[in-house]
Image: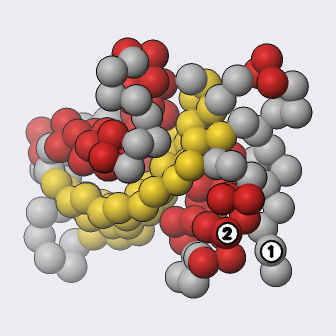
Amino acid sequence: MPLKTNGRIGQSALLLLLEEDCAHIEEQLQLSNWQFCKGKVGSMDTHKVVAAIETAAKNEKIINKDLYREGHALYHAIIEAMQGVTRGQVQLGSMLRTVGLSFSIVRGRPYDEPEEGEWIAVSLYGTIGAPVKGAEHETIGLGINHI
């Protein structure tokens, strides 16, 4: 079943992340002229998670590294997604928690009116728990921000 973006940038980011065979999702995103990428990160440090996602977005040219507003929009989408992952307390190591996450970033124009501009979504899925193998559980987060 082909993905129909229908302006649902968050749904697109989640499906891209969670679908094991996402070739059809990637194809639909390309047809919609939306940019996207995927990656993985694991850490006990929130700033390392943020840095890994920002680096992927810059390397894949999802955002322009020279424009503050683009990095700022991405940052807020990441923090919003991390709030879901951490249940509102965006702290990891200081609370003896670690994460192992996969992420996706999607950028596009989810509204018909061009004046609404571009938006960016960050989705995170993986595990969170004490830094002891086997002491983690699943977690998910989604953040969306305008650029």
Q: Is residue 146 above or below residue 101?
A: above
Q: Which residue is mark 2?
A: 27
Percent x, y for residue 139?
43, 61
Left or right of 142? Residue 11 is right
Quadrant in the rendering for residue 23: bottom right
User: Which numbered circle lies on residue 112?
Assistant: none
Q: Earlier in the sequence, mark 1 or mark 2?
A: 1
Relative placement, left or right, of 83 versus 110 is left
| Secondary structure under the numbered disc 1 in the rendered image | loop
The C terminus lies in which quarter of the figure? top right
Which residue sits at x=80%, y=74%?
Answer: 2
Q: CA distance from mark 1 to mark 2?
A: 9 Å
- Give coordinates of residue 64: x percent, y percent: 40, 29
> Which amino acid does the dot numbered 1 rest on?
Pro
Q: Residues within 10 Å of mark 2 (few under 14, many from 20)?
A: few
Towards the viewer: 137 or 82: 82
Res 67 visible: yes
SS under mark 2: helix
Nearer the camera: disc 1 or disc 2: 2
Q: Quadrant of the N terminus?
A: bottom right
Vertical comparison of 66 with 84: above or below: above
Residue at 80% in and 44% down: 7
- Residue 144 location, quadrant: top right
Residue 42: % across, % down: 21, 60
- Frontmost residue, 53 versus 57: 57
What residue is drawn where x is 45% and y is 16%? 69
Q: On the image, numbered disc 1 is attached to which residue?
A: 2
Q: Are marks 1 and 2 in contact (CB under 8 Å)?
A: yes
Foreground residue among 61 and 136:
61
Amino acid carrying mark 2 in the image: Glu
Q: Is residue 83 visible?
A: no
